[in-house]
Amino acid sequence: ALEKALQSDPQLWQARVLLARASLQHGNLGLAESHLRDVLKDHPRNVAAYQLLGEIARQQGNHDEAIRSFRLALLAAGDNDRRPEVVLARLSLAMSLRAQGYLCAAADQLEAYLDAVADPTPEMRRYRKLKEIMALYRGKAAGMIGEIRTELGAYRPAVAAYRRAVAESPDDPGLRKRLAYALARAGDADQAMEVARQWLVDFPQEANGFEFLKKTCELLGEPQRYDAELVRLAKQTTDPVVGEHLANLLLERQKVAEAIEQNKLFGYAGKKS
């Protein structure tokens, strides 16, 4: 049907864009690009064409060309345009900018993406590709901002970004862990330890939980605090398996009296020296 539409009206740019999307989905990047270049001959400010050209370049690993195409899409759209193609261009531009090391610019585009999807328009809600992306990047986009801010040494903004990410995806243990690290790097000891302790409660099956607690203490500049936290957990836990593990950790760290007390509490021998 689209091919017939183009035969009857070769200037029908919407049909060419749809054909380009279909070609892109089937991995035929050359045909997709050809359709899009034809669109731009007659419509040099076509946002959808530039956004898709950016996606083609990004899939090919050509981030410089992707950045150029996404920026042209945004330039053609204007500052306050919230068309789905514009929102998608902002997210993809952020990822290409980050890949090329333009961290501040990448964070700015991620912020703009999050502002747009915070209150999606009816058109955005109907646009299938954007709906999929919004679901996929729920929590993830804000987490990416947190990673960038951390890399830049801006720990307070990183905390704010991770808080937003955790609010969107509270069951993601990785986001909660990175929030604790950001708080520790920002020097907020009480909040960092609160997040770390709650993480251990909420995700008891996660591997390396105590290593996470140890690293949080180290990032605070208080490595000795780890022992105190182990003792605190040992006194609070009602799980015999966790209690035994804590007793063994305490013994390894030369906290013999505390380990013996933990062994007495749960009635097992624990690890022998």
Image: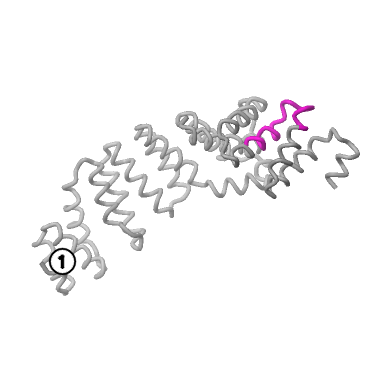
Which quadrant does the C terminus fall into?
bottom left
Q: Where is residue 124 in the image (x, y as percent from the top left)?
A: 65, 41
Residue 155 on the magenta segment: no
Report the magenta stretch's main SS. helix
Seen at 39% across and 53% down, the residue is 173
On the rendered structure, is 56 left or right of 237?
right
Quarter residue 156 falls in: top left
Identity of the residue drawn at 35% across and 63% down:
205
Q: Is residue 243 above or below residue 114?
A: below
Residue 204 lies in quadrant: bottom left
Relative to residue 120, is residue 226 drawn left or right? left
Residue 259 rendering spot, x and y as whole percentages: 13, 64
Which amino acid, by three-letter code, is at mark 1?
Gln
- Colouring method of the image: one colour
What is the span of residues highlighted in magenta in the rendered image? 38-54
User: Furthest-left residue in view?
Assistant: 257
Q: Nearer the viewer, residue 146 or 121?
A: 146
- Is residue 40 on the magenta stretch? yes
- The relative height of residue 173 versus residue 49 in the rendered view (above or below) is below
Residue 263: horizontal and vertical position, in percent?
15, 69
Q: List the residue tagged with mark 1.
A: 262
Residue name at image x 32 percent, y 45 percent: 180
